[in-house]
Image (spheres, rainbow, N blue to C red):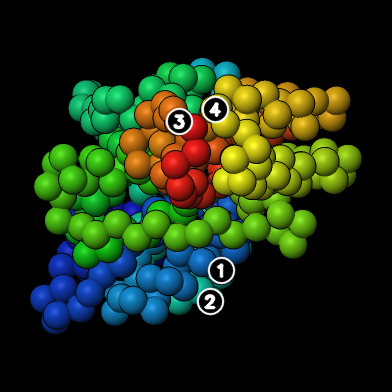
C-alpha cells in the first residue's frame, strides 16, 4: 500500500489506474480504524480494482470545545489494518497543505443539515461536505463507500453528489457492531469500563422502540422519542437528542409510515456516541 500526502500525487496515481481501465473505490476516514471502517475497505475490495482510503482528522468539522485535539490517532496501526484489509493507496494530507492559508470555500447542503446532529453541532456538516468535495476532487473515485452509522452524513453527501452532478456512485454500508450491539466507533476508546457496559443500551432502546413503531404500538414520533428517553434515563448516559424522521429526507412524518430512521446522540462520559436504526412501517395505521 502506498501512502501519499499530496493531493496531486493522489490524483496522479488514481488517474494512472483509471487510464488502465481500473474501477476505483474510495473510503474516507479519520483514522483510528476499527472493523466498521474495514468493512467499507473490504466491500470496496470486492467491487473495485483499485482501493483508496484517506486518513484525515478534518479540523473543519469540529466545533469549538469538541474533541479535535484529543481525537485518537494510531497511524502505524491504521496502515497495517488498511494494508491487511486490501487497500492499495492511502491519502494522508497534512492539514496545513490541504487547507492552505486563505482557504475560503465552503460547501453547504441546506435542509438536510438542520435536524439531528446538525442542530447540536453548528458547522459540522459544512465541514464534512467541504472535505468530502475536496477528497473527491483529489481522488476522483468511481465509488465512494460510507457507513450507515453516520446516517445523516451519508444522505447529506448523497444529496450533495446528486446536486453537484459529481461523477461518483455512493455505496452506503451497514453499521458494524460489537457482539453486544454497541456500534463500533473510534470514540468508544473514551469509555470507562462502567460506561462501556452501559453503552449497548443505546442500540437496545432504538431496536425496542422501532419494533413498537413497526407493530403499531407507538403511533407518533413524539411518543417514540419519549420512550427512548425513558429507557435511557438513570444511567451514565446523557441523551443529546433522539428523533424519529423520514429516512429519505429527514423530514418529520405523521402518520408514521414508510421508511423511517430513529437516530440519537448521547454523551457517555467523555464520548459523544451516535447510533440509528432504519426500518419500514407498512400498512395504513394512523
Ligand atoms: P470516521 O473515521 O468516523 O469519519 O468514519 C469513516 C467512515 O467509516 C464513515 O463513512 C463512517 O460512517 C464509517 N463508519 C464508522 N463507524 C462505522 C461502523 N461501526 N460501521 C460501519 N461504518 C462505520
Q: What's the distance in space between the residues labelled 3 and 2, CA to CA?
A: 47 Å
Q: Report whether residue 192 is seen.
A: no
Q: Nearer the viewer, residue 155 or 260?
A: 260
Viewed as shown, does residue 286 lie left or right of 181? left
The residue where tag 4 is placed is 221
Q: Secondary structure at mark 3?
A: loop
Q: Residues within 10 Å of mark 2 (few under 14, many from 20)?
A: some
Choose top left, top right, bottom left or bottom right for residue 69: top right
Residue 240 found in image quarter: top right
The residue pinned by badge 2 equals 84
Count every numbered label the image shows and give the total. Answer: 4
Q: Is residue 259 visible?
A: yes
Q: Which label belongs to residue 81?
A: 1
In whole angstroms, how far apart are the C-alphas of marks 4 and 2? 43 Å
Q: Residue at x 18, y 64 (%)?
A: 12
Answer with mark 3 or mark 1, whichever residue precedes in sequence: 1
Which-is-in-front pick, marks 3 and 4? 3
- Do the CB atoms of the residues marked 2 and 1 lie less than 8 Å apart? yes
Question: Which of 227/28 is in front?
Answer: 227
Q: Quadrant of residue 47?
A: bottom left
Q: Is mark 1 within 8 Å of ligand 1?
A: no
Residue at image coords 46%, 19%: 119
Whichever of labels 4 and 1 marks the residue nearer the N terminus, that label is 1
Q: Which residue is mark 3?
A: 255
- Mark 3 or mark 4: name the one nearer the start of the chain: 4
Q: Bin the neighbour count of mark 4 within 10 Å (Cα to Cα): few under 14, some 14-19, many 20 and up.
A: many
Q: Which quarter of the rendered picture does the N terminus lie within?
A: bottom left
Q: Secondary structure at mark 2?
A: helix
Which label sits in the foreground, 3 or 1? 3
Amino acid at each position: 500500500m502506498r501512502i501519499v500526502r499530496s493531493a496531486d500525487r493522489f490524483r496522479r496515481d488514481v488517474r494512472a489506474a483509471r487510464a488502465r481501465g481500473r474501477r476505483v473505490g474510495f473510503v474516507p476516514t479519520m483514522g483510528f480504524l476499527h472493523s466498521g471502517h474495514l468493512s467499507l475497505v473490504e466491500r470496496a475490495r470486492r467491487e473495485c480494482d483499485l482501493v483508496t482510503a484517506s486518513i484525515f482528522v478534518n479540523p473543519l468539522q469540529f466545533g469549538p470545545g469538541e474533541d479535535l485535539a484529543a481525537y485518537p490517532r494510531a497511524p502505524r496501526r491504521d496502515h497495517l489494518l488498511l494494508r491487511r484489509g486490501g487497500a492499495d493507496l492511502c491519502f494522508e494530507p497534512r492539514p496545513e497543505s490541504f487547507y492552505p492559508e486563505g482557504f475560503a470555500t465552503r460547501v453547504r447542503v441546506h435542509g438536510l443539515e438542520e435536524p439531528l446532529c446538525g442542530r447540536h453541532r453548528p458547522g459540522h456538516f459544512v465541514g464534512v461536505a467541504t472535505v468530502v468535495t475536496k477528497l473527491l476532487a483529489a481522488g476522483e473515485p468511481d465509488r465512494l463507500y460510507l457507513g450507515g452509522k453516520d446516517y445523516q452524513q451519508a444522505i447529506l453527501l448523497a444529496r450533495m453528489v446528486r446536486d453537484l452532478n459529481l461523477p461518483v456512485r455512493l455505496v452506503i454500508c451497514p453499521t458494524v457492531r460489537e457482539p453486544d450491539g454497541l456500534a463500533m466507533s473510534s470514540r468508544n476508546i473514551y469509555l470507562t469500563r462502567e460506561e462501556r457496559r452501559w453503552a449497548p443500551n443505546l442500540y437496545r432502546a432504538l431496536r425496542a422502540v422501532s419494533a413498537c413503531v413497526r407493530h403499531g404500538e407507538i403511533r407518533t414520533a413524539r411518543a417514540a422519542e419519549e420512550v427512548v428517553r425513558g429507557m435511557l434515563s438513570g444511567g451514565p448516559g446523557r441523551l443529546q437528542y433522539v428523533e424519529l424522521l423520514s429516512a429519505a429526507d429527514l423530514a418529520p412524518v405523521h402518520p408514521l409510515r414508510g421508511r423511517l430512521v430513529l437516530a440519537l446522540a448521547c454523551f457517555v462520559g467523555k464520548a459523544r456516541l451516535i447510533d440509528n436504526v432504519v426500518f419500514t412501517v407498512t400498512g395504513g395505521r394512523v
